[in-house]
Image (cartoon, grey):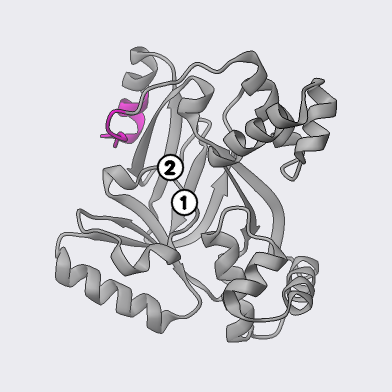
Amino acid sequence: MEYLTYEERSILTMLVTESWASPSSIAKRLGVSRQLAWYTLRRLREAGVVGDPMLYVRPDHAGLHYAFFQSEREPEDYTVLKFETLEGTYIFAVPFRTEEELRSLRERYGRPWFVPSLKPKPLTELQRRTLRLLLKNPLISSAELARELDLPRTKARKLVSWARRNVNFTYWVDLRRAGIAALAVKTEAPLGAYAAHKFFKCFAYATGFYAVAFPDLGRAAEFVRKLKAEDPKARINVVVGYELRPPEL
């Protein structure tokens, strides 16, 4: 495939920085026509640069604890989020239920990071069924949900809104071929003006961990310079691949 234009890379960047990004929202944000955004995404999907949709459900909303790790060892356990870095390390989130499971994870991957004060939240059966239907059809409408669960439309709208606040829907992008710059960051410095570049929502910002994506190396380098000026101890890794998966519900 030929070298991508800046406009095409900008569209791909939005796919990984905007949960639930659609051709319409991409077009509005970038100031291009909806037809151009739709055509570009279709062409890049046909070329294999954009793949299937992926979903991330907050593990605590599935009644689970979870921890983040950075390790040179590729995870053998079920991960809900995984970054592969250029430096050869992996950054990932693993759900767990018991202290024994956590001890086993520590032995394999080292010291974990935890999101402060995050505890498993019990789901009602209706919420659980809503999430399961959303995983099967990420674009399910409130009318479809109302039919599936035999609910009033008002109740269905509230459930869809609740589910989408706690689920990330995004498309897999081949970062190696896309030409966009993605960085995983562990820092105490605030995200500040770069919030719009955050690599979907990984729900670990409170631990000082997040990822950002840029359509070109120049803007990525500017971000790194400013971050290092604020936090010389910041750890920055280049992301070359990523994966999102929902926990078992």
Query: Which residue of the protein is positioned furthest toward the right in this rendering?
Result: 147
Lower position in the chain sequence, tag 2 or tag 1? 1
In percent of width and height, residue 211 lies at: 40, 57
Residue named by callout 1: 83
Range of residues picked out in magenta: 105-117
Say which residue appears at 36% left-offset and 47% top-offset: 72
Q: Is residue 182 visible?
A: no
32 up-or-down from 93: above or below = below
Q: Nearer the viewer, residue 34 or 191?
A: 34
Q: Secondary structure at mark 1?
A: strand
Q: Nearer the viewer, residue 220 or 24?
A: 24
Question: Is 68 colored magenta in this rendering?
Answer: no
In percent of width and height, residue 91 lies at: 40, 47
Q: Nearer the viewer, residue 210 or 178?
A: 210
190 up-or-down from 144: above or below = below
- On the picture, is 92 further left or further right than 138? left
Say which residue appears at 38% left-offset and 52% top-offset: 89
Say which residue appears at 43% left-offset and 42% top-offset: 92
Say which residue appears at 30% left-offset and 34% top-offset: 114
Q: Is residue 166 visible?
A: yes
In percent of width and height, residue 112 lies at: 29, 34
The secondary structure making up most of the magenta span is loop
Q: Quadrant of the N terminus?
A: bottom right
Residue named by callout 2: 92
What amino acid type is highlighted by mark number 2? Phe
**Are circles 2 and 1 on residues that touch, CB within 8 Å?**
yes
Q: Quadrant of the C terminus?
A: top right
Disc 2 from disc 1: Cα separation: 6 Å
